[in-house]
Image (spheres, rainbow, N blue to C red):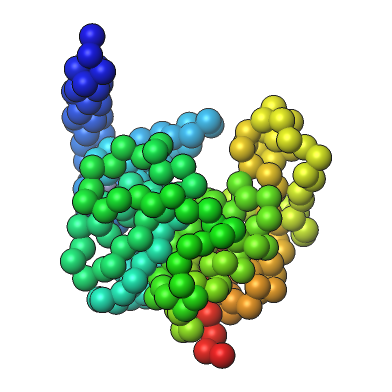
Amino acid sequence: MSSLLKFSIKQKHREYRKKRKEKIFKGNSVQCSICNSEYREFGPFGNTKRKNSKCHKCGSLERHRLIWKYIQDKKLIAKSIRLLHFAPEKVFYDIFSESDDIAYFPCDLHPKVYDYKGKTIINKVDITQIPYETDSFDFILCNHVLEHIPNDALAMSELYRVMKPNGLGIFQVPIDYDRDKTYEDFSITSPKARLKAFGRRDHVRWYGKDYKERLTNTGFEVTEDDYISSFTKEEQFKYGFDSTELIYLCKKPMQ
Ligand SMILES: [Zn+2]
């Protein structure tokens, strides 16, 4: 069987499963802040099958809906901006690549793993050596990337360098708030040992409460925003948010 045919069969199965789920979860108790679809509940997702997590239509997860709601509410993305996006999540890629107002630069160290069909090419970029000019981006999205990077201080300093003065970024990472200090041990290198130590096979650390300080040390003005607590419990369920997530909004001050 040709790989193209295999792909098209897979695609059909995916579409079928999606339609079926949309039917099963029909309702209006939850609403996706990205695609506006309404359901009885979002689908379960993740190793632990978190409830009320994945949108049946656009595939958004808790953190995507939270970040998008935040960006919209705070009007963080204006027209005519240059936007750099690391490890581009599909839900955001689809919005930005379709926008005529945004000069959009999605990138990843391994761009071949993405099969997105948008019009913007995903560039190969090493976050510790960003091939763009200093002071060149108005907004940077870099979610769930830094926990994979051994020299995260260098990555942060590169994010800082390419951001325009007064520019903004959202840099989310998984954080264990029971730890005061970030835990990293570079002698742990095997996927199995990393899974045990850091919760994932490809993570190199567990960030702790000092994550904000690590960003501040780079030069950013950091707002650790407990935005989620501005919503009632009912609203948090409605939008399918993870009630423990804080938003890390980083600004490069004017020099
Ligand atoms: Zn959605």
Residue depicted at x 31% and y 37%: 115
Q: Taking 19 as reference, is 253 left or right?
A: right
Q: Is residue 153 visible?
A: yes
Give x and y (percent) for residue 106.
Answer: 37, 56
Tally the numbered discs: 0
Above or below: residue 52 compared with residue 139? above
Q: Taking 31 as reference, is 216 left or right?
A: right
User: As drawn, which residue projects farthest toward the top?
Assistant: 1
Residue depicted at x 65% and y 73%: 218
Give x and y (percent) for residue 101.
Answer: 21, 71
Give x and y (percent) for residue 44.
Answer: 41, 34
| Quarter occupied by residue 98 | bottom left
On-image quarter of the C terminus: bottom right
Residue depicted at x 31% and y 63%: 104
Above or below: residue 119 compared with residue 229? above
Above or below: residue 3 compared with residue 146? above
Give x and y (percent) for residue 27.
Answer: 22, 41
